[in-house]
Every structure is written in C-alpha cells, then in structure tokens.
Image (cartoon, rainbow, N blue to C red):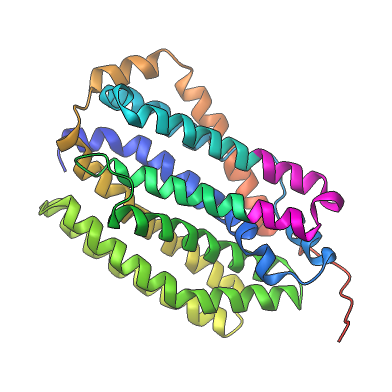
Amino acid sequence: MNADSNVLLLPLCFFGLYMILEAADWGLCLSAPLVCRSRDENRAVLGLLRPCLDGNELWYFLGLFMMGAAIPGVSDNLFHTENIVLILLVAAGALLRMAASLFRNSCSQPAVMKVISVFSYAALAVMGLAGSSLLMNDGSQFSILGIFCALWMILAAFQLGTLYGAVKAVNPLAERFRAAFLVSSVLTVAVYIILAILLKSHAGDSNTYGSFFWISLVATAILFVAAFFMTRMRHVKVGLAAAYVSSFFAIAIYLSAYAAVLPSLFTVEVDSLKQAMDGMPGTALLVIAFVWTLGAFLWRQIRKKEYYEWKDHV
C-alpha cells in the first residue's frame, strides 16, 4: 500500500467499527421473524436491542465525512447521491430499532417485526451494493462483486445477531438462535470465500496487500471454525467472542481492498482531508464517540439475559 492508501485507512477503520459494533443489532432484526414463535419472544428480542442510543452510527458518519474530504471526486458523481441514501438508511435503521425497543408492546406484533426485518435486509443489501460500486471502474452496482458484498453484509450481521441472541436470551429462544447460527454457517463460509477471491482479484498484485490478505484470511478461518464448534458444543459465550474477532479480520480484508484500489481510481487529497479535520472538533468528537460506543458495547456484553414467559402450547 502507498501513502494514499494509508490516508484512507482511518475513515475505513471507522466504517469497520460501525460494522462490528452494529452488526448484532442488524442481525437480531434480520433473524427475529425466523426464530420467534410468540409476541413474548418478539418482546425479548426487542429488549436485546437496548441501549437505544449506542452512538455506533457516529463512526459511519465520520467515515463518510472523512472519505468525502479525502476523495473530493466522489462527490462530483453518482456516489454523492449514494452517500445521501446510505446516511438515510443508517439513520432510519437506528431510529427504527430505537422505536421498537422503546415501544416493545406495540412493535412486538408479527407484522411489525416482519417490516423491521424486511427493512434490515434491504438496507444491508443496498449498503453492500453501494460500497462495492466504489471498487468498479464504471461505478457499477449490480456486479458479481456487488451481489456477494450484499450477501455477505446480510449473512455476517445475521450470524453475529443470532449468536448474540443465543448468549443473551433464554431457552427455548436461545436454542433457536443457536440453531440459526449453525445452519447459516455453511452458506456464510461459501459466500465469504467467493467474496474474498473477488476482492483479491480487484486489489491486484500488491505485495503488502497480498501478505495481509492471506494472514487475515487464515485468521478468519481459524476463528470462525472455533466459533462454530464452541457454539455447537453450547459454549456460546466463547463462540461469540471468537465470532467477533473473526469478524474483525473478515472486515479488515474487505476494507483494506478499498485502501488498495481507491487511490488508483480517484485522486486522494491529503491536504483537503487535513483542512476538513482542522475545521471540526476532531479530537473531542473522537474521544466522545469512543467512550460512548465502547461503554455501550461493554454493557451489552455483560448485561443480564433477557427473560420472558414461555407458554408451551404443544
């Protein structure tokens, strides 16, 4: 990677933080209609979305701001409109989940849960398609790479969401979450292998990226296998920890491809990025965002299980 690639690493890290921190929330919304059998279970899932304001969206917005400042050419074409759409989707998703967790009784109806789930599928698919278009010479969204980016965004969120549900819900809901994770694992692995091959082909023959790619791919595979078998053995807490670390390496492969490719497609303006950061309360904002989101993430990991009344109708 050259100096221009290194400049893009910071905004790309912000995108990665958002993807890791918010994946479980997206995944809970994706999987709820598939694993829940009653309104009580729906309410339990909505309770897992707390805290309502976790601040994770700040990382996404900061990443978009810095990316736009570093690559002004992006704002001169179709990608500018796409950025607006992505901001609206991220904000709407956060507001929708916040409303659902605050008004659990009203939003626990099956029809409402399906609406939330459909929106989550659509939003993640659009995010995957729009993100992949930056790697294409013609800016095309509906490419093979775009389709697999969209599928991976959905499946990765689904996996972390179901595994988090398996840890923080109680049986029988937790067992259904665990089963959903195990069943979807094969498809997730297949999609990610294809996506990794496509990303490697787009990133070219960079020696730095090539070494990083293979190291991260091996780490992703080992940790994902550990997450799968730990979850299969019902050590779901260990499985969740391994899944989070595996997701870190998987996202690193995904985003580092952007750092390798974007400088060859766009002009990276280092001075423009510095001026944009000087014009905003950068350090203070980053510290607030870090403390806020880290605190919310840690609280979610140590919080008590979400209990509900299970009514056996069988």
In the rendered structure, which segment of residues is drawn in magenta?
A: 95-117
- Estimate the x, y position of residue 241 in percent, counting from the top left: 53, 66
Residue 194 placement, left or right of 209: right
Q: Which is more toward the observer, 237 or 204?
A: 204
Q: Main secondary structure of the magenta part?
A: helix
Q: Is residue 183 magenta?
A: no
Q: How many marks?
A: 0
Q: Is residue 190 visible?
A: yes
- Estimate the x, y position of residue 237 in percent, counting from the top left: 60, 71
Q: Is residue 67 visible?
A: no
Residue drawn at x 52%, y 23% as measured from the top left: 284
Residue drawn at x 53%, y 66% as measured from the top left: 159
* Residue 74 drawn above or below residue 206: above
Give the quarter of the figure containing the N terminus: top left
* Residue 146 drawn above or below residue 134: below
Give the quarter of the figure containing the C terminus: bottom right
Residue 83 placement, left or right of 132: right
Q: Which is more toward the observer, 167 or 65?
A: 65
* Residue 277 drawn above or below residue 291: above
Residue drawn at x 17%, y 34% as measured from the top left: 3
Residue 245 placement, left or right of 134: right
Residue drawn at x 10%, y 54% as measured from the top left: 205
